[in-house]
């Protein structure tokens, strides 16, 4: 055991940083933070963090949000929230912890999974997407946005189409019992890959969408 520890700690800081940046921040901090001051320093000063909250216990979620996330929030490049049976009410807990999208200055990948909207969730998650200036990939997976009004839903779509660096967008959701997707009012200058599930289109609406998304590949 001592030999293995010596071999591990003989690796350079640069190599540790390259390895650490490949893994999820929740697992990294759980495994390495507190072992020694060197690991603590390396973990806090990584260039980018991937934060995946799928299948995390509430206690671990609360501990990570309270203890570690405030120190790495402006270097978090990947965030995935998932409100499922393994992690129920995660969106509400994330909101109550005081985090807002404005704080994620360098977020590039955002996945929202199993969102069941209510007025507070709508205001918190969907009213300030426009702050995510560095976002390149956005995914909605199995989301139920039944409480979003048609006007607010239009605003969400317009915010997304105005994100300056967004290249990939994936929509898997239903809203207010309709299968119609709102046509954005702005032209996206960056979107290249777009997936929209469970929606049907009138031909003229589909043409309108293509006009608002001229850089699709």
Image (cartoon, rainbow, N blue to C red):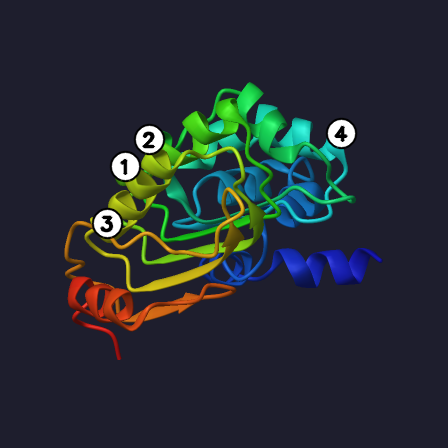
Task: Give the Cα distance between marks 4 and 3.
Answer: 34 Å
Q: Which image quadrant: the N terminus?
A: bottom right
Q: Residue at x 16, y 70 (%)?
A: 214
Residue 29: x, y in percent?
63, 42
Task: Give the Cα distance between marks 4 and 1.
Answer: 29 Å
Q: Are marks 3 and 2 in contact (CB under 8 Å)?
A: no
Label placed on residue 59: 4
Residue 202 vs 28, above or below: the answer is below
The residue mark sitting in front, 4 or 3, is: 3
Q: Is residue 134 visible?
A: yes
Q: Are marks 2 and 4 in contact (CB under 8 Å)?
A: no
The answer to which quarter of the image holds residue 97 is: top right
Q: Are marks 2 and 1 in contact (CB under 8 Å)?
A: yes
Label placed on residue 131: 1
Q: Residue at x 39, y 42 (%)?
A: 75
Q: Left of 85 or right of it: where is 61?
A: left
Task: Compare marks 2 and 4 and give the one earlier in the sequence.
Answer: 4
Residue 83: x, y in percent?
66, 41
The residue mark sitting in front, 3 or 2, is: 3
Q: Residue at x 36, y 30 (%)?
A: 103
Q: Are marks 4 and 1 in contact (CB under 8 Å)?
A: no
The residue mark sitting in front, 2 or 4, is: 2
């Amino acid at each position: 055991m001592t030999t293995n520890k010596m071999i591990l700690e003989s690796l350079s800081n640069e190599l540790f940083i390259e390895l650490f940046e490949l893994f999820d921040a929740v697992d990294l901090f759980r495994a390495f933070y507190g072992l020694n001051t060197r690991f603590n320093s390396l973990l806090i000063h990584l260039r980018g963090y991937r934060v995946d909250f799928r299948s995390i216990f509430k206690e671990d979620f609360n501990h990570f949000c309270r203890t570690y996330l405030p120190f790495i929030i402006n270097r978090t490049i990947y965030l995935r929230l998932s409100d499922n049976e393994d992690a129920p009410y995660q969106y509400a807990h994330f909101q109550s912890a005081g985090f807002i999208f404005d704080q994620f200055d360098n977020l590039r990948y955002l996945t929202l999974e199993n969102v069941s909207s209510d007025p507070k969730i709508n205001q918190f998650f969907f009213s300030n997407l426009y702050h995510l200036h560095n976002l390149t990939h956005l995914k909605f997976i199995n989301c139920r946005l039944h409480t979003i009004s048609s006007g607010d839903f239009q605003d969400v779509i317009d915010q997304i189409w105005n994100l300056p660096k967004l290249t990939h967008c994936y929509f898997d959701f239903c809203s207010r019992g309709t299968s119609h997707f709102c046509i954005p009012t702005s032209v996206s200058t960056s979107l290249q890959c777009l997936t929209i599930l469970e929606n049907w289109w009138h031909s003229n609406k589909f043409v309108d969408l293509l006009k608002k998304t001229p850089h699709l590949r």
